Image (cartoon, rainbow, N blue to C red):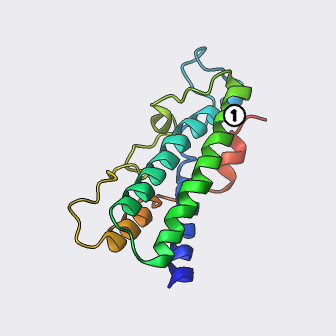
Amino acid sequence: MRGRLFGLLLIGFAAVALAACGGSTKNASTAAAGETGEVPFDRAFIDGMVPHHRAAIEMANGAKSAGLSQPDLVAIAGDIVATQQLEIDEMLDWRKDWFGSRVVDPQGAQSLGLSEDEMGMQHEADFSSVDDVDQAFAAMMIDHHRGEPLPPQWPTSEASA
């Protein structure tokens, strides 16, 4: 069960990572933010992924607080909190180094051409009204990582060198 659920979550994460790379087909490295109104791809990606990761952490913490009990899901929730926070910290460090600020633009997902729903951030981390916290958490995390996969070469063609 743990391997199957973890595999589903991993596949879902890969799908959203690819989906999060959507948006403009112009090379963002050719236009600085503010000059043309276009946000550099790397900054837009960070600004979209940080809130996406934060939402996963909120769901994992919310599920644990609400009584998440299936051992594999408890382990996954713990892993989400630990790994996603490390990734957030790393992305914010990159943002500071590359763009001079750790402050995330709340329009990051929109700069990628994606809605908050497409980024998997349509769920509240409130498990108070669910009958089965384990099932609700698993369903939320799978939905959180759904997205329309885009060509894998697109991110590298858009990212700044």
What is the x, y in percent for residue 114? 45, 43
Task: Please say whether residue 2 is visible from this viewpoint.
Answer: yes
Residue plotted at (40% across, 70% down): 138
Give the camera-side residue of 123 and 108.
123
**Screen quadrant of the C terminus:** top right
As helix, strand or loop, the secondary structure at mark 1 comes to: helix
What is the x, y in percent for residue 101? 63, 23
- Residue receiving disc 1: 93
Q: Is residue 4 left or right of residue 121?
A: right
> Relative to 12, is 46 above or below?
above
Give the camera-side residue of 60 and 24.
60
Residue plotted at (48% across, 58% down): 148
Give the camera-side residue of 85 and 122.
85
Task: Please say whether residue 27 is visible from this viewpoint.
Answer: no
Q: Residue furthest right?
A: 161
> Relative to 144, is 114 above or below?
above
Q: Is residue 1 left or right of residue 157?
A: left
Give the camera-side residue of 12 and 71.
71
What is the x, y in percent for residue 150? 56, 55
Residue plotted at (48% across, 77% down): 71
> Relative to 93, is 1 above or below?
below
**In which quadrant of the rendered view does residue 49 lie?**
top right
As shown in the figure, which amino acid type bears the numbered disc 1?
Asp
